[in-house]
Image (spheres, rainbow, N blue to C red):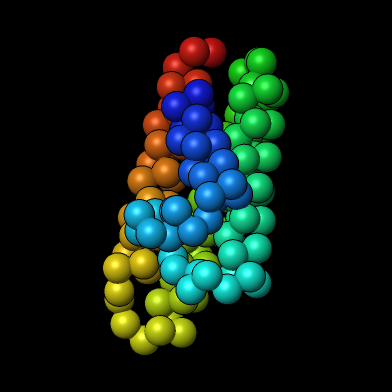
Amino acid sequence: MIVGSVVRLGYGIGAAIAPLGMCRRRLAPSVHEMPDPRMNLRGFGGALSAIALYTLASARSPDRARSLLWLNAVTDACDAAVSLLELRARGKLDRVVVGGLAINITALAWWTLASRTLRGAD
């Protein structure tokens, strides 16, 4: 949970503080230096940071950790669903959609592994 949350926090802080840098490095879709898309990327980064910080601060017991695993897994599942909606809207697989799906599927696998590890600790 720590590794997953630190990765989420790193991305979230980058998106919130330096959205254009994230875009230039192809770590986020281009916002074309427009204020509204830039603000949306910042908001996404803020939400990811909040989930990561809450997870890191609150996973103090196995029961609490299970609940937070669900929060993280559902967040990544919803984000993957958004990528699928975007795939449908674009009508083709492109680098941004594939990247989004790959990251979220990897994250879902990570949370599944963490859940199994947590079950083994009981």
Is 13 on the left or on the right of 54, as rendered? left
Q: Residue 101: image x %, image y %?
A: 38, 60
Name the one closer to the observer, 16 or 83: 16
Is 91 on the left or on the right of 83, as rendered? left
Residue occupying image coordinates x 38% and y 59%: 24
Q: Residue 1: image x %, image y %?
A: 50, 27
Q: 72 above or below 65?
A: below
Q: 109 above or below 27?
A: above
Q: Residue 7: image x %, image y %?
A: 46, 35
Name the one closer to the observer, 103 or 121: 103
Residue occupying image coordinates x 43% and y 60%: 23
Residue occupying image coordinates x 37% and y 68%: 97
Residue occupying image coordinates x 36% and y 67%: 96
Total labels: the figure holds 0
Q: Quadrant of residue 34?
A: bottom right
Q: 55 above or below 14?
A: above
Residue 63 in view, yes or no: no
Name the one closer to the observer, 38 or 44: 38
Q: Quadrant of residue 49?
A: top right
Q: Residue 82: image x %, image y %?
A: 52, 67
Residue 31 in view, yes or no: yes
Q: 93 above or below 72?
A: below
Is 102 on the left or on the right of 76, as rendered? left
